[in-house]
Image (cartoon, grey):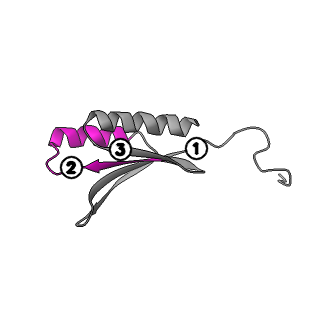
Amino acid sequence: MPASGVSAAAIAARLSALGLPTRVEEHRRHSSVEAEVPDGLSAESWREALDVVAEADRFGLLATSLNGRTLWAVVHRTVPTTGDVGGPSYQR
C-alpha cells in the first residue's frame, strides 16, 4: 500500500474511533476517506474529527438534504524527487 494509503487508513481509523462510519478508496494520484457524520454529533467530536482530517492534503464537508453530511479527506501520493520523473522523452 502506498504511503498515501497508509495515511488515509490512519485517518479512517481515527474517525471510526469517533463512531463515524468510514470508507477508504485508492485512486491513481491520491487516497480518499469519506465518513458519514450522524445528526447530533457533539461539538467535542466535531473538533476531534476536524483535527483528524486537517492532517490530510485536502478536506471538506459535503452536506445535502438527501444524503446527510459526509466529511471527506484526500491524501496525495508523493511524487518521486529523483530518477526518471519526466519519462524517457523528458528534456531539461
Q: Residue furthest bottom?
A: 65
| Residue at 15% in and 42% down | 42
Q: Position of residue 63 (x, y in %)?
A: 27, 61
Q: CA distance from mark 2 to mark 1?
A: 30 Å
SS for callout 3: strand
**Residue range corresponding to the magenta coloring:** 32-54
Q: CA distance from mark 3 to mark 1?
A: 20 Å
Query: Are the residues flagged by discs 3 and 1 in contact, CB closer than 8 Å?
Result: no
| Residue at 17% in and 38% down | 44
In this rendering, the label closer to the viewer, 2 or 1: 2
| Residue at 58% in and 44% down | 77
Residue position for label 3: 22
Would residue 10 be counted in the magenta stretch?
Answer: no
Q: Position of residue 84 (x, y in %)?
A: 79, 43
| Left or right, 32 with reference to 67 | right
| Residue at 60% in and 51% down | 28
- Mark sitting earlier along the chain (3/2): 3
- Mark sitting earlier along the chain (3/1): 3
Residue position for label 2: 38
| Amino acid tagged 2 | Pro
| Residue count near mark 1 (Cα–Cα under 10 Å), binned few <14, some 14–19, many ≥20 | some
SS for callout 1: loop
Q: Position of residue 33 (x, y in %)?
A: 42, 46
In this rendering, the label closer to the viewer, 3 or 1: 3
Would residue 36 be counted in the magenta stretch?
Answer: yes
